[in-house]
Structures are given as structure tokens and as C-alpha cells.
Image (cartoon, rainbow, N blue to C red):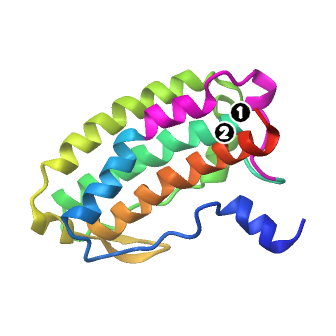
Amino acid sequence: MMTDEFEGLKYPIGQPTLDAMLDQRGRDRHVRSIETLAVRLREAVDGLMEDQLDTPYRPGGWTVRQVVHHLPDSHANAYIRFKLAVTEKDPTIRVYDEAAWAREAEAVSAPVALSLDLLDALHRRWVVWMRGLEDQTWSRMLHHPEMGLLNLSALLCVYGWHSEHHLAHIVGLRQREGW
């Protein structure tokens, strides 16, 4: 597989763009992406058979099932990170080994409905909370050990992008395979 083709499968919507100065319209766009992800993800996996759920979205990539289970893992961490940034002064957040989490037994074999339900509930709560934040709160900072100092606006960009990124993995695989 050529490098450009591989990168296209790995990053189907490109790399994230972090905007530390998002205006209300930009925030609304990313919050809406998070808000609608659970429904769109459920639609993206609807009707897939077990062997299709266990198909990697790209060579060497996670399976559809692992991607679905990864999203609430990642976004639960994000929710906590956001809350820490608002309730503490410039907290340093923990990173975690996403690949190791994706190899855990439930991520490899559990029904995707478990994570779809978890993601739906988590996102409903997170979105209600984010929509209640005052403008100045979006400038609150946290220290990410790998990304450096970020404010909530930049972090929102990460997770808005992350939502679309993994959804595109599944939708793209379905299109390529004719599912």
C-alpha cells in the first residue's frame, strides 16, 4: 500500500486543527459533532455481522469493534480532563495507552451495543455541561504531557475531530467493502 493511501485510511479527514481562540460558532460546531456522534455511530455499525465488526478499518488498524469501544474510553477521559481544567488550576492530566486498552478482552469481543449506550449517556451529560459554560471558561488551561499546555477550546477541537475521525474510519470501510 502506498504511503498516501495508507495515510488516507489512517487519517480520512486529515489531522486535527487546534484553535485556542474558538468563537461561539466554532464551539457549537464541535459540540454538535460530539452530541450527534452516538446516533451516527450506531447508524454506521447497524446491520454489521460479527465478522464485519471484527474487520480492521485499515491494514494494521483496529477492528470496527475496537474503534466503537475506544470512543467511550477516550471520551470518558476527555470528560474528566475538561472537568479538571475547570475545577483545578492548570492541572496536568494523565495520558493512557490507548492501544493497550483496545487489546483488552472487552474491547476485542464485547457487544458494541454496550459502548454505544455508554457513549450516548456520556455525550448527553458532557454536552449539557459544555453548553452551560461561560465564554471565559473556554480559556481555562490544562497540561497534556504529550501535547503541552492547552485551553478548553483547543481540547474541544481535539474531541470534535476525534468524533469525526473514527466515524470516518467505519463509514469508509463500509463504503470500500460495499457493506
**Which residue position is annotated with label 2?**
66
Residue 63 is at least partly visible in this image: no
Circles 1 and 2: CB atoms closer than 8 Å? yes
Q: Quarter-wise, where is residue 113 in the image?
A: top right
Identified by mark 2, the residue type is Gln
Please name the residue shown 65% across and 43% down the image: 170
Please name the residue shown 35% across and 35% down the image: 122
Q: Quarter-wise, where is residue 35 in the image?
A: top left
Horizontal side, residue 7 vs residue 75: left or right: right
Q: Secondary structure at mark 2?
A: helix
Query: Residue 108: which disc?
Result: 1
Can you say whether 57 is above or below 159 in the image?
Answer: above
* Residue 42: x %, y % from top left: 53, 29
Identified by mark 1, the residue type is Val
Q: Quarter-wise, where is residue 94 in the image?
A: bottom left
Structural distance between the alpha carbons of marks 1 and 2: 6 Å
Query: Residue 28: which disc?
Result: none
* Residue 85: x %, y % from top left: 24, 62
The segment highlighted magenta reads 37-58
Horizontal side, residue 134 vs residue 102: left or right: left
Disc 1 residue crowd, few under 14, some 14–19, many 20+, Cα 10 Å = many
Quadrant in which the N terminus is drawn: bottom right
Q: In the rendered picture of this protein, how many numbered marks are placed on residues?
A: 2
